[in-house]
């Protein structure tokens, strides 16, 4: 039986994929890719076929498209590894003056944290967050919400690339009128400030599931809405069991992997 020849989409996508993987001129991290019209003219293909080529690259995590600007090579070829255990140790999350675990982890990966303004306020938290805090359904909590960016260039003109969305919640009676409501939480980030307030975290539980993003999440992450994301729910409590932080992270599956290492008791 004759071997089926790959279709035009697969053939052209494979050609572009090869150029991206070897960082050919014009196909390095962050470079702008040819337009749909350019791809049509170069390969004599239909408009939808050219669109499907870009979609194939996006599904592989090799490209992203921004409305009105075109398609670009992903700044991160390969995956970022999130150390689910070591990243929250006090020495790790403040390493090099980092403002928390995310910035410190990027530094260790050879990337650059690109800070943007954090949306900070007080609001009624989602039901599961209120339950974790033991709050009445009408009670408010402090939130910190941000689109977290990473880049490869320390240049201030490089805005970086959104690699995750995160919203953290804190009980109002702990966080109100403290540095947790300021843009800069200082070295070690919010966890260190909670420790300063007498609420050091001693136990962390994380749950992870894969799902499709909402329209707003897909737009913020510059991904197609049919590319899955991880939703990671981070819950941290004190020695006496009080939950003092709940954070929800939304992370593209094509960018992130998770790593966990722990010791077992001797048999």
Image: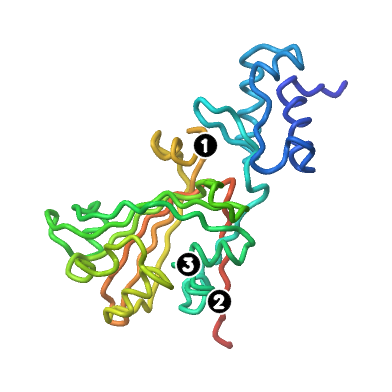
Left or right, 103 with reference to 77: left
The part of the image, by quadrant, that contains residue 240 is: bottom left
What is the spatial separation of the Cα atoms under label 2 and label 1, in whole angstroms? Answer: 33 Å
Pointer 1 residue: 223
> Quick one: 62 or 266, which is closer to the camera?
62
Question: Quadrant where the C terminus lies?
Answer: bottom right
Left or right, 63 with reference to 177: right
Residue 266, placed above or below residue 12 = below
Pointer 2 residue: 262
Where's residue 196, x and y in %? 31, 80
- First in sequence: mark 2 vs mark 1: 1
Residue 213 disc label: none
- First in sequence: mark 3 vs mark 2: 3
Q: Residue furthest bottom?
A: 266
- Numbered disc 2: secondary structure: loop
- First in sequence: mark 3 vs mark 1: 3
Q: What residue is drawn where x is 54% and y is 47%?
A: 157
Mark 2 vs mark 1, foreground winner is 1
Where's residue 187, x and y in %? 43, 72
Pointer 3 residue: 101
Left or right, 128 with reference to 146: left
Q: What residue is drawn where x is 74% and y is 19%?
A: 8
Left or right, 161 with reference to 128: right
């Amino acid at each position: 039986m004759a071997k089926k020849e790959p279709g035009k989409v697969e053939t052209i996508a494979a050609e572009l994929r090869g150029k991206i993987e070897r960082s050919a001129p014009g196909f390095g991290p962050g470079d702008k890719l040819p337009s749909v019209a350019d791809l049509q003219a170069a390969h004599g293909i239909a408009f939808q076929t050219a669109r499907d080529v870009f979609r194939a690259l996006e599904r592989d995590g090799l490209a992203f498209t921004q409305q009105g600007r075109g398609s670009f090579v992903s700044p991160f070829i390969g995956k970022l590894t999130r150390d689910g255990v070591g990243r929250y140790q006090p020495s790790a999350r403040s390493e090099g003056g980092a403002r928390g675990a995310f910035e410190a982890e990027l530094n260790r990966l050879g990337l650059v944290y690109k800070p943007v303004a954090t949306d900070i306020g007080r609001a009624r938290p989602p039901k599961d967050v209120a339950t974790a805090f033991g709050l009445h359904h009408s009670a408010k909590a402090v939130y910190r919400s941000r689109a977290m960016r990473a880049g490869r260039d320390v240049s201030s003109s490089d805005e970086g690339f959104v690699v995750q969305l995160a919203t953290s919640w804190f009980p109002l009676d702990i966080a109100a009128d403290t540095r947790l409501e300021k843009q800069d939480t200082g070295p070690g980030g919010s966890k260190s400030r909670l420790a300063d307030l007498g609420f050091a975290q001693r136990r962390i539980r994380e749950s992870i599931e894969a799902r499709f993003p909402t329209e707003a999440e897909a737009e913020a992450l510059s991904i197609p809405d049919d590319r899955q994301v991880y939703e990671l729910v981070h819950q941290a409590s004190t020695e006496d069991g009080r939950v003092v932080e709940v954070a929800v992270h939304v992370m593209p599956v094509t960018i992130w992997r998770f790593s966990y290492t722990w010791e077992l008791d001797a048999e």
